[in-house]
Image (cartoon, grey):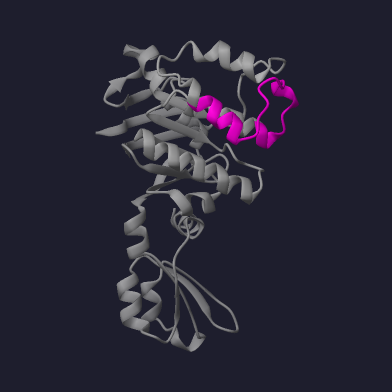
């Protein structure tokens, strides 16, 4: 089963238009949605979360329509974004006590484990936490009711790489225990290079790339070599190539053909999602 199925989804907000013909988010995998600011990532998340209503099309969560059973579907989803709506003057204990009663799968033991592991004092007020501590508490809250779908919208933006690495490790471990699905929207593509199973790139409200990590690894490559190796024929293997006085750097979506053409005369590098995003954005 797919965790999320989207068909013919359209939404207009001012001059911005979201238009997605088809998107399936596979169950029990990490799908990363990447794109520059304004690409439509947050609008898509709000539509999935039923915060916004679509103009056209359908969105199913584990085969169900959100409108038919909002309470049940909300219990299946854990959302972590830029900001929360927690009362800032409440202590962490107050917030937990207020919210946990709405989730039948709330796991007090797991919550205590995370707050202790994250070195959080539950008597502290939410407003007094650092940005990193707030993200840790937010993560502890959503993981403690064992959601089947975890939606992340730039939760670690502006945080240091060490913290982001710890965050991803905790997320991945709990995801594997709960057999949950992660939808991770971010412009920090290096995070998805570490944990992503599927990659979706957006630009101007449309999907411009949708592949799994295995196909990406097998088919895409970065090639670096001497300038004299380039000619009209060899350039055809590249979707994008940059030349300078010392040589060239090209990206190809046909790794085997590039290797057949250049052999051992060049260097090959694994492509990162940032490279693929830039390439596909440039194609449009």
Query: Which residue sits at x=35%, y=18%?
Result: 66
Let me know if residue 45 is in the magenta part. Answer: no
Residue 3: image location, x then y, percent: 32, 32
Residue nearest the observer in this picture, 94 or 160 = 94
Residue 43 drawn above or below residue 199: above
Query: Which residue sits at x=37%, y=62%?
Result: 217
Query: Which residue sits at x=48%, y=39%?
Result: 171
Residue nearest the observer in this picture, 34 or 239 = 34
Residue 188 drawn above or below residue 150: below
Quarter of the image where the N terminus is located: top left
> In which image quadrant can residue 120 be found?
top right
Let me know if residue 125 is in the magenta part. Answer: yes
Residue 209: image location, x then y, percent: 39, 50
| Residue 14, visible in the rendered structure | no
Q: How many marks?
A: 0
Residue 64: image location, x then y, percent: 28, 21
Residue nearest the observer in this picture, 175 or 203 = 175
Residue 260 drawn above or below residue 69: below
Residue 283 drawn above or below residue 12: below
Query: Which residue sits at x=57%, y=45%?
Result: 166
44 sits left or right of 135 in the view = left
> In which image quadrant can residue 183 be found?
top left
Write the start and end of the magenta stretch as one range: 110-133
> In which image quadrant can residue 18 be found?
top left
Residue 110: image location, x then y, percent: 49, 27
| Residue 104, visible in the rendered structure | yes
Which residue occupies the extreme right position in the image? Answer: 128
């Amino acid at each position: 089963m797919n965790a999320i199925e989207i068909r013919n989804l359209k939404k207009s907000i001012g001059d911005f238009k979201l238009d997605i013909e088809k998107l399936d988010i596979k169950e029990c995998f990490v799908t990363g949605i990447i794109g520059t600011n304004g690409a439509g990532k947050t609008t898509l998340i709000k539509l999935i979360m039923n915060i916004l209503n679509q103009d056209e099309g359908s969105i199913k969560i584990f085969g169900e329509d959100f409108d038919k059973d909002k309470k049940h579907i909300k219990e299946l989803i854990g959302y972590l974004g830029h900001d929360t709506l927690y009362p800032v003057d409440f202590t962490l204990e107050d917030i937990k006590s207020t919210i946990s009663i709405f989730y039948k799968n709330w796991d007090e033991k797991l919550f205590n484990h995370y707050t202790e592991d994250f070195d959080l004092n539950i008597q502290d007020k939410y407003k007094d936490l650092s940005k990193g501590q707030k993200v840790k508490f937010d993560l502890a809250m959503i993981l403690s009711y064992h959601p089947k779908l975890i939606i992340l919208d730039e939760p670690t933006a502006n945080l240091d790489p060490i913290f982001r690495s710890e965050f991803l490790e905790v997320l991945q471990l709990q995801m594997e225990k709960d057999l949950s699905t992660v939808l991770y929207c971010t412009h920090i593509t290096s995070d998805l290079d570490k944990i992503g199973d599927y990659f979706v790139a957006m630009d101007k409200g449309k999907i411009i790339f949708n592949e799994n990590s295995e196909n990406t690894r097998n088919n895409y490559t970065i090639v670096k070599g001497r300038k004299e190796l380039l000619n009209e024929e060899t350039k055809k293997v590249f979707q994008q190539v940059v030349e300078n006085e010392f040589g060239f750097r090209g990206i190809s979506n046909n790794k085997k053909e590039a290797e057949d053409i250049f052999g051992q005369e060049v260097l090959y590098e694994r492509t990162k999602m940032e490279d693929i995003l830039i390439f596909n954005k440039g194609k449009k």
